[in-house]
Amino acid sequence: MEPQRYGPFPYRTARDLLSFRWPGDARLAVWVIPNIEFFPLDEPIPGGRGVPDLNAWSKRDYGNRIGVFRLMDTLARFGFKGTVALNSDICAAHPQIISEAMRLDWELMGHCETNARALNTIPEDDEAAVISNVVATIERASGARPRGWLGAGLQETWRTLEHLCDAGLDYVADWANDDQPYMMYLGDRRLVSIPYTLEINDRPAFERYYRSSAEFEQMIRDQFDVLYRESERVAKVMAIALHPFLIGVPHRIGALENALDYIRGHDGVWAATGSEIVDHFVAVAGDD
C-alpha cells in the first residue's frame, strides 16, 4: 500500500462488531501462538550486547532445545494446537522441532527467516524474495504451505501486505488492534487481519514489565474473563502469544498450565488455530 494515515480497512468501533458464532455455537475462539525463533550466534541479537552474545543467545537456545518441547506437552495436555510464528531458519537448524510440530498437527505461520532481521531492516528490494523464501522453506520442511504471517517484531514496510498477497497468504497477525478478525483491502485483493496480542504475550510481560509468573497467569485469566463475558453478545478472539525460552522454563510453565486449565473450565470456548478462525470468519462474515 502507499503511505497513508490509516490502515487499508474501514475504522470499526466496539459498537460495530459483527454478530456471529464460532463452530459448535462457541462464543470465544482462543488461539495460542508459540513464537519459535532462530538467532544465529554470529549475528547481533536485537537489543543485545555484541557478537557473540552468549547471555542472550543461550536463553533462546534453551527455548529451542528444552522449552519448546515442554510447551508442546503442556498445550497437548489441555487440547490446544499451536499456531507457530516460525522463523524459517528453524527448518534447517532444528528440524526436530518441525517434525514434532507436524506430529501434533500444529499450524506453521511465516515469521521471517530469523528474528535477527526484521522486514523493515533489510533492503527494500529484498523483501519480496525473503517472504517468498520463508513460505517455500516452511512448505518444503512441513509439507504444508503457510497461510498466515507474523512479522519479526510485528514489523512491516509499506509493501509488506502486497508481498504477502503475492506469496499466496490468507491472513496476517501484525495489526493487533481488534477483538475480531476483519478484512484488509489491497486494491482488488483481500487479506484477513486476525487478532494478535502485545498484552497477553510473555515477552513484554516478563522482559519489559517484569511481571511475575503468577501475575502473567492472572493476566491471562483476567483477559479471558472480560472477553468471555463480552462474547455472550458477539463472537470474539483471544490470543495468547508465547516464547519457549520464556514460558518454557521450569519456574514459569506452571502459570500457563493453571491458566489453560481455567480456560478449559468454561463452556463455549473454541480452541482453534489461526487458519480455522480465518476460514470460519470468511465463511460467515467475510463479506460484511
Image: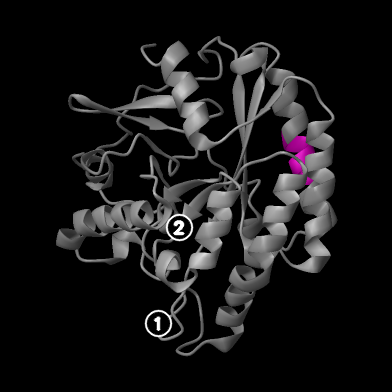
Which range of residues does the magenta coloring cover? 218-223
Disc number placed over residue 43 in the picture, else none: 1
What secondary structure is marked by label 1?
Answer: loop
Q: Which comes sooner in the sequence, label 2 or label 1?
A: 1
What secondary structure is marked by label 2?
Answer: helix
Q: Main secondary structure of the magenta part?
A: helix
The residue lying at 83 percent from left, 40 percent from top is 261
Q: Residues within 10 Å of mark 2 (few under 14, many from 20)?
A: some
Which amino acid is tagged 2?
A: Gly
Occupied quadrant, residue 279: top left
Disc number placed over residue 153 in the picture, else none: 2
Which amino acid is tagged 1?
A: Glu
User: Is residue 126 magenta-colored?
Assistant: no
Residue 229 visible somewhere in the drawing: yes
Q: Left of 40 or right of it: where is 259?
A: right
The residue lying at 78 percent from left, 37 percent from top is 222
Vertical relation: 223 (above or below) 226: below
